[in-house]
Image (spheres, rainbow, N blue to C red):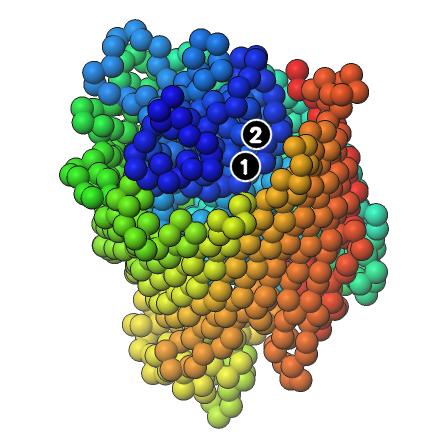
């Protein structure tokens, strides 16, 4: 039969646009067979024949149809139909089985078109918008790391917080459950045991976390998103874009974007139960999961429920914290419920409706003694927090003539954190400090995408749209002592944002052009305009290209502008006026009784933080080593106008020339009165009665746009998938990051190092994996390394040692043992019980290790039982 070719000559014929078949005869319907697959991510010209050979089926595909496309990795045991769907995910292609199921034809995914026949069974458009682009079927020139549900399971990771903390590009400083006292940064805290992403250590508020491409409500006060609120069983994969992306997504996407992508279709019911604990004590974990789904001809629905209970880790359970009171909490107790529903349904013809909904409820507890001679009930505090969040995102997709698609979407989310801190003095309850931070987001967007004109490499495509979003924050703090409640802060403010965006993809050359030494060349561009009334107006561009001299080698590069709007906390929390002695600032030569008025708090006049980013990536997929993929990326971000507290320490502030712009050395009485009137009230900490005539200076410590940062470094990612035999496969990989970053707090102050210093990311982080599997057993080993740090907080500078941990996992499917659908898993995390290096502390109740870089969990043993019903 003319046009039938083998996988060996597939690619050569493919470039000529031939109709091809990768063939292997079978006797049973292909859709009914279950096979072991080991097909790496690669060009479709290689991926489809490789899948056909392993599946033992015939696959017909047009060369022009698959030219320039890449198929996804398929590893594991799947029915052929399900495996082929995974292979084609994101390509804009679907498989059509003939009546016997023995011949499979690759076709374009059914479009939502205006000419669709009313009442015809609807097949959802499987083209997935790649993180970093709004154009269907595109390939982003930005570096993107993909972590699949299978890879999370192989690594023994059971919540998304654990997944992102294992990324070499991520830093655990910010809002995370393992962060304890010691860091000098206000943003390094654990208010509600949420887990935020902090790429490059730039800030959890400078990394955008989205769910199926849509925004969630912020958590607490720091404008970060709790990624651990999402049930892990509902997640298909996570895509991490480590590049500035404000031109695509708007504010917050300075360091990058983390997109949590849900399973679109799942048919069946799956339950699991997990138990484990740390061998040194504490961290007892229980986790129960339920995932259920149903597919039908015109849509599908999935639902997931997860319950977690995690015991606390205390200082008395770890040898390196023996100097602390044994009751001090290192990792808080948590109880967490979460639920998610996601569905899509054809409304007839050209219209599809989809919706995602998420609910999370978390409580935690911690004990914080202020001395080493008694528990928090003697002298210290007990803290209890409750965090409840909710999100719902509907979407309507309408097909238009000419392969255009119109999308309208909305989002609504809330996140409420309530905290009560009970302070004890002399074994008696001295005061209670309640606090509440309530966030809300509501937004709507409409956009269109489709081809605009033909180019040699294919159709140029355009995406345009507009939207509006409003964020609100309510903050409340108070103290209750002696039956009297004193409100410290109480505010409820918001910000409305309007935006327009456009993006274009220009395929100049594609493989079907058959040009020597140029397999593919694509140009991309995006521009976004955002208006923040009362704050700023910004236009952020981004340009990129992909150039591949051959299918084995690819160059990608991007350049763009990004920004982050000031947080609502930075703009609207109350301003404080405090009267202090000049001696509190270490100043001499002033008259006896001289005082200073210190202003601190929010600044409603803040402008947006701005960044310029660029990346360059070399991708290698050598044909002589099928399954091998190497990416090497250089990144650089210049970040300016960062919002900071300009004077971090009072000592020397009145005499340091760097602070001259923030101090009024000859204030008038009118200026003094105006500052006090604009604050929440005057606090007198001078030790003498208030006499404003003694004020010799106004020190302005209110937030302002003052800091600049330079972040640069190298990412290397290597993965090699090898088929050892028909039943055995091996996957090996290494991911590492080298980071350099520095900061100039105030212009003229000089640069100070960030990366490589204590309570900042180390220069080096790496993670290596080795996973072997066959049809029934999967065994994995994962080695993580965090480099050493310099403790330069005071002389002499000391070295903080690096940490290397080994995780081992084993999973066995028991189908062959008569327990159909049953699997058991065993995990040994931090197998050699590596401990953090000790650091210097000035407060005897401060834990003597860097909790932003090293975990107190220690060696952990876990066991999981899964059942598919």
The residue identified by callout 2 is: 54
- Residue drawn at the location 72% of the way across and 56% of the way down: 805
**Numbered mark located on residue 39 in the image:** 1
**Neighbour class for label 2 at 10 Å: few (<14), some, many (≥20)?**
some
Number of the front mark, 1 or 2: 2
The local secondary structure at tag 2 comes to: helix
The local secondary structure at tag 1 comes to: strand
Does any portion of residue 487 appear in the rendered image?
A: no
Q: Quadrant of residue 285?
A: top right
- Residue drawn at the location 40% of the way across and 86% of the way down: 657
- Residue drawn at the location 40% of the way across and 39% of the way down: 11
Sequence-wise first label, 1 or 2: 1
Seen from this angle, which residue lies furthest front?
1
User: Is there CB contact under 8 Å for labels 1 and 2?
Assistant: yes
Q: Nearer the viewer, residue 208 or 463?
A: 463
Q: Quadrant of residue 542?
A: bottom left
Q: Nearer the viewer, residue 349 or 284?
A: 349
């Amino acid at each position: 039969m003319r046009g039938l070719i083998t996988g060996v000559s597939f690619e050569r014929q493919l470039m000529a646009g031939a109709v091809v078949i990768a063939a292997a005869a079978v006797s049973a319907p292909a859709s009914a067979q279950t096979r072991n697959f080991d097909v790496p991510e690669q060009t479709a010209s290689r991926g489809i024949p490789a899948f056909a050979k392993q599946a033992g089926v015939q696959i017909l595909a047009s060369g022009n149809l698959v030219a320039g496309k890449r198929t996804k990795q398929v590893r594991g045991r799947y029915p052929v139909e399900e495996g082929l769907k995974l292979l084609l995910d994101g390509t804009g292609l679907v498989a059509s089985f003939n009546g016997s199921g023995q011949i499979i034809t690759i076709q374009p995914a059914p479009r939502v078109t205006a000419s669709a026949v009313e009442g015809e069974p609807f097949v959802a458009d499987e083209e997935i918008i790649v993180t970093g682009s709004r154009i269907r079927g595109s390939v982003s020139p930005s570096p993107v790391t993909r972590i699949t549900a299978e890879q999370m399971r192989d690594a023994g990771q059971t919540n998304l917080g654990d997944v992102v903390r294992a990324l070499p590009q991520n830093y655990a400083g910010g809002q995370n459950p393992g962060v304890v006292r010691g860091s000098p940064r206000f943003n390094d805290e654990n208010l509600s045991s949420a887990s935020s992403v902090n790429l490059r250590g730039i800030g959890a508020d400078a990394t955008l976390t989205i769910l199926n491409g849509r925004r969630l409500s912020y958590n607490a006060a720091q404008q970060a998103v709790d990624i651990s609120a999402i049930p892990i069983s509902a997640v298909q994969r996570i895509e991490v874009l480590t590049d500035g992306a404000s031109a695509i997504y708007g504010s917050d996407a300075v360091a990058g974007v983390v997109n949590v992508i849900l399973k679109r279709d799942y048919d069946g019911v799956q339950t699991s139960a997990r138990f484990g604990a740390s061998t040194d004590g504490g961290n007892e974990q229980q986790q129960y999961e339920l995932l259920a789904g149903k597919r039908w001809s015109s849509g599908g629905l999935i639902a997931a429920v997860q319950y977690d209970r995690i015991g606390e880790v205390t200082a008395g359970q770890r040898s390196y914290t023996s100097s602390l009171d044994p009751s001090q909490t290192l990792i808080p107790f948590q109880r967490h419920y979460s639920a998610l529903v996601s569905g899509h349904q054809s409304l007839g013809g050209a219209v599809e409706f989809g919706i995602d909904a998420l609910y999370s409820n978390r409580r935690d507890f911690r004990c914080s003694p202020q001395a080493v001679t008694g528990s928090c009930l003697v002298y210290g505090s007990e803290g209890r927090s409750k965090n409840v969040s909710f999100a719902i995102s509907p979407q309507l997709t309408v097909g238009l003539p000419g392969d255009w698609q119109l999308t309208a979407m909305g989002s609504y989310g809330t996140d409420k954190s309530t905290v009560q801190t009970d302070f004890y003095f002399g074994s008696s309850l001295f005061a209670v400090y309640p606090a509440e931070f309530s966030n809300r987001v509501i937004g709507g967007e409409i956009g269109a995408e489709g081809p605009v004109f033909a180019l040699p490499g294919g159709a140029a495509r355009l995406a345009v749209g507009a939207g509006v979003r409003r964020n609100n924050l309510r903050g409340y703090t108070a103290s209750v002592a002696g039956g009297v409640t004193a409100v410290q802060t109480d505010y409820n403010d918001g910000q409305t944002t309007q935006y327009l965006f456009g993006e274009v993809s220009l395929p100049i050359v594609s493989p079907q052009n058959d040009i020597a030494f140029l397999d593919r060349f694509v140009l991309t561009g995006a521009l976004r305009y955002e208006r923040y009334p009362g704050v700023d107006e910004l236009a952020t561009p981004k340009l990129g290209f992909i150039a591949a001299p051959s299918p084995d080698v690819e160059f990608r590069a991007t350049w763009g502008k990004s920004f982050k709007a000031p947080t609502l906390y930075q703009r609207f929390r109350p301003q404080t006026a405090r009267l202090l002695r000049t001696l509190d600032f270490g100043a001499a030569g002033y008259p006896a009784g001289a005082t200073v008025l210190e202003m601190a708090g929010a600044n409603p006049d803040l402008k947006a933080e701005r960044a310029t980013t660029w990346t360059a990536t070399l991708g290698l997929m050598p044909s002589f080593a099928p399954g091998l993929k190497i990416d090497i990326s250089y990144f650089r971000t210049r970040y300016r106008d960062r919002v900071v507290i300009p004077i971090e320490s009072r000592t020397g502030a009145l005499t340091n020339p760097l602070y001259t712009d923030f101090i009024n050395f000859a204030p008038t009485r009118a200026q003094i009165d105006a500052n006090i009137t604009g604050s929440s009230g005057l606090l007198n900490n001078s030790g003498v009665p208030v006499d404003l005539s003694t004020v010799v200076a106004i020190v302005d410590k209110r937030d302002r746009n003052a800091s600049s940062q330079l972040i640069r470094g190298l990412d290397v990612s290597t993965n090699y998938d090898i088929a050892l035999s028909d039943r055995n496969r091996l996957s090996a990989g290494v991911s590492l990051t080298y980071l350099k970053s520095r900061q100039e707090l105030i212009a003229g102050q000089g640069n100070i190092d960030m990366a490589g210093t204590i309570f900042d990311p180390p220069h080096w982080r790496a993670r290596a994996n080795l996973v072997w599997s066959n049809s029934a057993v999967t065994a994995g080993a994962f080695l993580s390394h965090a480099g050493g740090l310099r403790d330069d907080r005071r002389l002499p500078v000391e070295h903080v040692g690096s940490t290397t941990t080994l995780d081992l996992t084993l999973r066995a499917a028991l189908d062959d043992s008569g327990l159909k659908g049953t699997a058991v898993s065993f995990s040994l995390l931090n197998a050699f019980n590596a401990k953090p290096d000790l650091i210097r502390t000035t407060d005897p109740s401060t834990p003597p290790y860097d909790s932003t870089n090293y975990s107190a969990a220690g060696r952990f043993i876990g066991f999981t039982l899964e059942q598919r019903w």
